[in-house]
Amino acid sequence: MPPLGAPPTYSTPATLGLALLAIVTSLWHFTLGALDYAGTGRYPGLALLLLAGLLLVYGVLTLIRYAEARDAMHDPQPRAAMYATPHEGRVPLVGLGLAGLLVLADAAFVFSGQLPWWHVGGLLVSGVLARQAWRIRPAAGDD
């Protein structure tokens, strides 16, 4: 457990980067899912839109956590360490899982979609998101 008054983990620039990357990646995949909806069939397009929607919710919630943590750092009399909870280590793992699913979906769309090069770009953006989520996860003993 971090010492009393320590800055919360969610207040780091890496968390802000993860949230913004998640939002950008979700918007990229919303667009690709809508454009390739007719070319690949109804259900693959809906699956990509659903994954993009989940990633958008994840990105917005992570951004809210970042803003709350930054605000909590200015509390003149902290009464407890902020965000020292088990979910703190699971948040990056959820982002890693969603990014991994998008990588798999993009790999499938590269071969079946109408816009393969745009899905290659989606692979790259999802890979950067997965790398960021992997980078900010806490060490094994911290959770």
Image (cartoon, rainbow, N blue to C red):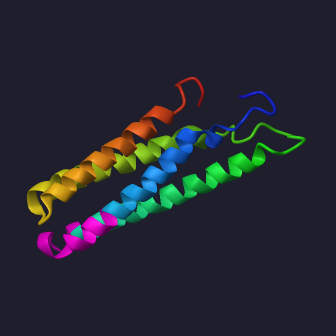
Could you tell me if residue 13 is visible in this image? yes
The reply to whether residue 47 is in sight is no
Splitting the image into 4 quarters, where does residue 132 fall? top left
Residue at (87, 40) in percent of width and height: 79
The residues colored magenta run 29-44
Q: Quadrant of the N terminus?
A: top right
Residue at coordinates 55% horizontally, 43% vertically from top-left? Answer: 15
The percent coordinates of residue 107 (x first, y second) are: 18, 51
- The extreme top residue here reads 141
- Residue 41 quadrant: bottom left
Counting from the top left corner in percent of width and height, residue 115 is at 14, 63
Horizontal side, residue 102 vs residue 3: left or right? left
**Which residue is rendered at x = 38% and y = 63% of the image?**
27
The residue lying furthest to the left in this view is 111
Q: Is residue 131 magenta?
A: no
Q: Position of residue 61 (x, y in %)?
A: 56, 57
Taking 35 as reference, is 56 above or below it? above
